Image (cartoon, helix red, strand yellow):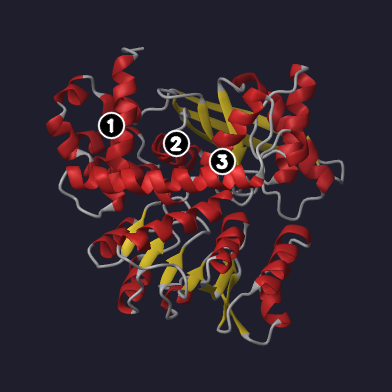
Amino acid sequence: MSDILENVKKRDPHEPEFHQAAEEVIDSIGPVLEKHPEFRKHKVLERLLEPERQISFKVSWVDDQGEVQVNRGYRVQMNSAIGPYKGGLRFHPSVYPGILKFLAFEQTFKNALTGLPMGGGKGGSDFNPKGKSDGEVMRFCQNFFMELNRHVGHRIDVPAGDIGVGSREIGYMFGTYKKLSNEFTGVLTGKGVGWGGSLLRTEATGYGLVYFSENMLNHINDSVKGKTCLVSGSGNVAQHTVEKLLHMGAKPISVSDSSGFIYDEEGIDEDKLAYIKELKNVKRGRIKEYAEKYSSAKYFASEKDQSSNPLWDIKADCAFPCATQNEVNAKDAENLVKNKVVLIGEGANMPLEADAAKIVIDSDILYSPGKASNAGGVATSGIEMMQNYMGSYWSKEQVDKKLQEIMKEIHTNCLQASEEYGFKNDYVKGANIYSFKKVARATIAQGII
């Protein structure tokens, strides 16, 4: 097994996020390969670690000053063993092929966990929508999708949103696709409800995270109700994590953005959440403004070279990192353990560094990996795809019921898989084992192609 990881690092030496994701899976599935030698014989793991296709392209566009700008666009089509490629598009300066390969690899396992027929993919650009006018974002999205259009389709590859890609960007890209293809099909998810989108798609990742966490706590005869909760991020996932925590009787006390975080000792209530949504979604402001409006809140600016994030050293019962990958380091994890946090639920993809994850796993904290606990977003994307195939719309109640069922089933499957292979109550290994076996069997059944 170590030789497989070494080969990954040798072939792609400058992709640390992908190495981290690969190592986590490899560390989990050793007993599976011993029990199922056919997986080794067919080199399933080696095949899953290599994308089926990686696409890179130029995106030229004109800004409001009439200057030509050039960005890079990407799509990583990782695995299609159980369905069409499915995964978000990320617009952020940090985007490069390695981070997209890590996300597409994680997406393959996450999608397998949902029980829906979806493969894994991810894409995006180093374009930064922050500070851009609607016209600039529209022109970029149109030129980006003019190229990506060649590689997607509602039975081939169905992208969605991610960091930097919300309903505005999805709308511009869908309009471009419709113009080029001359047809109205569900080639993107996260669309507006009035034009092919699903109710609750926007809320689903955050809601699903809380549903999964409730299942974890119920398993030890506990509940989210009454828990004080730390949340990082202030985008879509964080907002709806806070919202569902409030619905279920918990007390969220923090949110953050790249500039820093706020700690509201009194708790973030419905009115304060409404302000956060307006601030971040409409005004596109900074979270510091929350502390300027509410005297109960304190603002802590991010500092360069800080050894830990003080957000994770605030006393609380539960922690929900919902901002970005590797936002929680080993010192942060030590602080969470020291403060006797009961549960850590990942809302972002791989928000704990490898050393931080090891510290948490070795503790008594209930810990869910993002591929399991944030799968509600892609699950509801799958529900949107189903509605598009049928040409129908489901009610909010129908979607929410299905989402709760999916998150409960993921929780059950993770527990059963971990217990079967001697890792009782280990959600990380359970998620990797269950999803790997599912994709492996489909891979073998379809031959070597």
Kind of residue at disc 1:
Lys
Q: Is residue 396 left or right of residue 376?
A: right
Mark 1 residue element? helix
Q: What residue sits right under mark 1 in the picture?
A: 437
Instruction: Please tell me whether residue 84 is drawn above or below residue 237 in the rendered image.
Output: above
Q: Look at 65% across and 46% down and name the residue there.
A: 396
Kind of residue at disc 3:
Thr
The answer to which of marks 2 and 1 sits earlier in the sequence is: 2
Q: What residue sits right under mark 3 in the picture?
A: 380
Mark 2 residue element? helix
In the rendering, at what x and y percent does residue 49 appear? 34, 31
Q: Look at 30% across and 52% down and name the residue there.
A: 427
Q: Nearer the viewer, residue 188 or 69?
A: 188
In the rendering, at what x and y percent does residue 218 appear? 36, 61
Residue 355 in view (yes/no): yes
Is the residue marked by circle 1 packed among few (<14), some (14-19), or many (20+) residues within 10 Å? many
Instruction: Please tell me whether residue 25 is drawn above or below residue 273 in the rendered image.
Output: above
Report the residue that reaches farthest toward the right: 65
Quarter occupied by residue 281 = bottom right
In the rendering, at what x and y percent does residue 289 appear? 71, 75
Kind of residue at disc 2:
Asn
Mark 1 or mark 3, which is nearer to you? Answer: 3
Gap in angstroms between the C-alphas marked 1 and 3:
23 Å
Circles 2, 3 touching at the beta carbon (< 8 Å):
no
Image quadrant in which the N terminus is located: top left
Q: What residue sits right under mark 2 in the picture?
A: 111
Gap in angstroms between the C-alphas marked 2 and 3:
11 Å
Q: Look at 43% across and 77% down and name the residue there.
A: 316
